[in-house]
Amino acid sequence: MNNSPLSGPAPAIATPRPTPAVTVRNVRRIYGDEANPVHALDDVSLNLNRREFTAIMGPSGSGKSTLMNVIAGLDDVTSGQITVGDTPITGLTDTARTLLRRHHIGFVFQSFNLVPTLTADENIRLPFVLAGRTIDADTQAWIAHLVGSLGLRDRLDHLPSELSGGQQQRVAIARALATRPTIILADEPTGALDTRTSREVLSLLTTAAREYGQGIAMVTHDPVAASYADRILVLADGRVVGEYGHLDPRQISDLLINLEVKA
Ligand code: ADP
Ligand code: MG
């Protein structure tokens, strides 16, 4: 028997509602010209929550990367609204969006995107340098904790070229987590990694959401990767066509196959 005061059903009033880190409302992104429009995002509405690890799936060309880019303010929406934290980013000037991005968004790309001439340590600290933020004692301790738990302590003086792919991706994740952003956007973060290293990276993202309360959105086409997530959103032709809680890899494969059959 578990007699801890935390066991048993929680009173309804204490059930925390997920707090949106990002809200996307009726967003369209149309590329091309009027004669040949490409509806990369076609009336998309969704939330990405704090403390939650969301996987974003869908066939190639379904709008996954466009979604990441418009949330990050790297690309403009054609219409609709996006807020990051409490700030509406649609309508901000480029400079204001850059500042918002530095403070609220962490990126992890398939290709790691580390600065080749900077050491692992310098790469991890780069977001603070770019934002002109000093690293206080608390943040220093947080970075040391991340570096330790990512197994990077004896790699800090290495350049990216002196690190394995898995180590480079762990540096990129440490860099993304270091500033405690409102949301981490990861576009196919395990796409270039072997199976074992992928699992390590995925466990780490799971831990970041569960233990550090980090909101994470990860684009992936891999059912095993998506099975680490708390929630799965499926896009097709620029629209959200499915939303699920946690699923196992087999269930995810089945739903993707069904989607292809329908298409
Ligand atoms: P995914 O990441 O799901 O593979 P994308 O978001 O990259 O899909 O692309 C969605 C659609 O928008 C595709 O049809 C793609 O060709 C188109 N697209 C994406 N970026 C551009 C762009 N910069 N210019 C024109 N079309 C684009
Ligand atoms: Mg993509």
Image (cartoon, grey):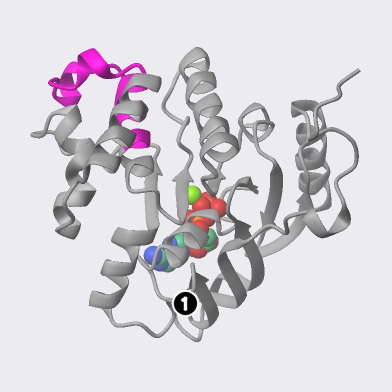
Main structural element of the magenta stretch: helix, strand or loop? helix
Residue 90 or 44: which is nearer the viewer? 90
Query: In this rendering, does residue 135 appear at all?
Result: yes
On screen, residue 165 versus residue 70, left or right, reads left
Q: Is residue 74 above or below residue 177?
A: below
Question: Type of residue at label 1?
Answer: Val
Task: Please check the rendered image and state whether residue 153 is part of the magenta-colored stretch, yes or no.
Answer: yes
Q: Residue at x 26, y 17 (%)?
A: 153
Task: Please check the rendered image and state whether residue 108 is part of the magenta-colored stretch, yes or no.
Answer: no
Pinpoint residue 95: horizontal percent, then vertical percent.
Answer: 23, 76
Pinpoint residue 125: horizontal percent, then vertical percent.
Answer: 20, 41
Q: Is residue 186 above or below residue 130?
A: above
Pinpoint residue 44: horizontal percent, then vertical percent.
Answer: 64, 70
Report the residue marked by disc 1: 77
* Magenta span of residues: 151-174
Q: Residue at x 45, y 36 (%)?
A: 189
State which quadrant residue 148 falls in: top left
Pinpoint residue 147: horizontal percent, then vertical percent.
Answer: 31, 25
State which quadrant residue 62 falls in: bottom right
Point out the image quarter for the N terminus.
Answer: top right
Numbered-mark total: 1
Point out the image quarter for the C terminus.
Answer: bottom right
On screen, residue 96 versus residue 194, left or right, reads left
Task: Count residues near mark 1 (Cα–Cα under 10 Å), then give few for <14, some for 14-19, many for 20+.
Answer: many
On screen, residue 57 versus residue 106, left or right, reads right
Residue 136 or 77: which is nearer the viewer? 136
Please tell me whether mark 1 sits on a helix, a strand or a loop: loop
Q: Is residue 243 above or below residue 154?
A: below
Q: Residue at x 23, y 49 (%)?
A: 127
On screen, residue 111 versus residue 232, left or right, reads left
Query: In this rendering, does residue 37 appear at all?
Result: no
